[in-house]
Amino acid sequence: MLKKWIKLIFVSLLFIAAQVWLFNPISLFRYATPFIYPVLLLMFPINTGTGALTLFGFFTGLAIDALSGTPGLHTSAFTATAFLRNTLIRPFLGDNILEEGTVGQNMSNTRFYLLLLKILVVHLLLLMLLDAFSLFDPLYLLLRFCACVALSYMISVIIFLITGSSHRIS
């Protein structure tokens, strides 16, 4: 059990570092910036409580904000997404749920990738709406949201395909 949590912490630190120093500088056509850290929510066991997920979301968002220079933006969006994680997962789970397993161990790949898309959409919608309070341009917001979702989803799927069954942390 402790080995799983140590592995999850290590993977989280890698994702935070990759987000801050590798993906944040990318801005394709001034619209698309990939965000991969919401994937971390899918690596937690099914039975993880909302409180623990919310704390994880807060500290992960805080680390990304501190290292990126975006005061509170990622913290707010990722804390809310982490809070909603169990609610977002529920419709995707079948009847045969492994209480100790991760999300990926409890569903088919198709359902897993649809859930990944759903979590990315919720997180990026919150992130873009919070960011839009500074200067609101609806067309730019819509284009940026769609481009970020598409790029984030493609990169996240590629990460899962390259690493094999990493969403099935055991």
Image: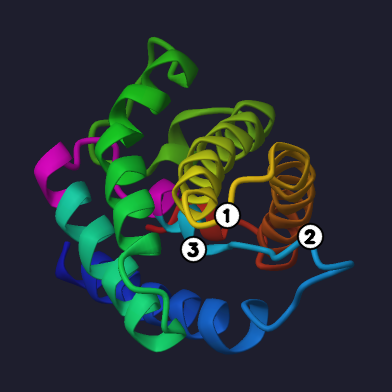
Q: Residue furthest top?
A: 95
Q: Amino acid at mark 3?
A: Tyr
Q: What residue appears at the point 29 percent right and 30 percent down from the top-left corner?
A: 86
The dot on residue 37 is 3
Residue under label 2: 31
Q: Quadrant of the N terminus?
A: bottom left
Residue under label 1: 135
The dot on residue 33 is none
Q: How many badges with numbers are in the image?
A: 3
Asked whether 48 falls inside the magenta stretch, the response is yes
Query: Residue 53's x, y, as percent?
Result: 21, 49
What's the distance in space between the residues labelled 3 and 1, CA to CA?
Answer: 25 Å
* CB contact under 8 Å: marks 3 and 1: no
* CB contact under 8 Å: marks 2 and 3: no
Query: Residue 169's x, y, as percent?
Result: 42, 58
**Helix or strand or loop: what does disc 1 sit on?**
loop
Mark 2 against mark 3, which lies toward the viewer? 2
Q: Quadrant of the C terminus?
A: bottom left
- Disc 3 residue crowd, few under 14, some 14–19, many 20+, Cα 10 Å: many
Query: Residue 160's x, y, as percent?
Result: 66, 58
What's the distance in space between the residues labelled 2 and 3, CA to CA?
Answer: 18 Å
What's the distance in space between the residues labelled 2 and 1, CA to CA?
Answer: 15 Å
Residue bounds of the magenta highlight: 41-52
